[in-house]
Amino acid sequence: MRDPKNYKYSDLTEKIIKEVYYVFNKLGSGFLEKVYEKALIHRLNLIGLNAESQKPIHVRMDGVLVGEYYADIVIDDKIIIELKAKNLLAKIDEVQLVNYLKATKIEVGLLINFGEKIEIRRKVNTMDYNKEN
């Protein structure tokens, strides 16, 4: 098993996760996703991170814009945070985050669920964008 300290942006993700638990310990479960998003943005900005809320993601195919989505939070154009506030995460939640990573070419994503307890899943986009298809 790999040491989490060796993961890309591990120091940054540790800071984010610390603030996720801070928010959860203060608010508990049961709020809408937007409440957790605003609270987490507040905490991340407070500790000096450049946290952008609802950053547009453009999906292109053959150079044509075919879709537009919004990432819940983007940190320094390095990490996408997808937030949920539901009982359990589903596979489709992970797929959504991976697709956001592909569309933005951002390498690291955190899927965070503010359910009855905190669930955090780390996803990494390892596609080589310098290769031609």
Image (tube, helix red, strand yellow):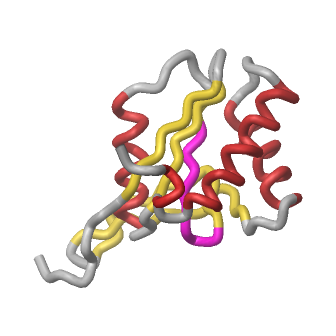
Relative to 122, 23 lies left or right: right
Q: Per the image, is 29 magenta?
A: no
Give percent across and percent down for residue 47.
84, 60
Residue drawn at x 64%, y 61% as measured from the top left: 12
Relative to 45, 76 lies left or right: left
Q: Which residues are magenta?
A: 76-83
* Nearer the observer, 106 or 4: 4
Give percent across and percent down for residue 66.
32, 63
Residue at the left extreme?
133
In which image quadrant can residue 70 be found?
bottom right
Relative to 6, 45 lies left or right: right
Residue drawn at x 27%, y 77% as measured from the top left: 129
In which image quadrant can residue 71 be found?
bottom right
* Nearer the observer, 64 or 10: 10
Q: Does 27 sit above or below residue 99?
A: above
Q: Does 22 sit above or below residue 130?
A: above
Quadrant placement of the C terminus: bottom left
Give percent across and percent down for residue 106.
45, 67
Count of marks, rendered view: 0
Q: Does 43 sit above or below residue 65?
A: above
Residue drawn at x 55%, y 64% as measured from the top left: 9
Residue drawn at x 64%, y 71% as measured from the top left: 76
Quadrant placement of the N terminus: top left
Q: Per the image, is 82 magenta?
A: yes
Q: Does 112 sit above or below residue 99?
A: above
* Dominant SS in magenta: strand
In which image quadrant can residue 87 be found?
top right
Give percent across and percent down for residue 92.
36, 33
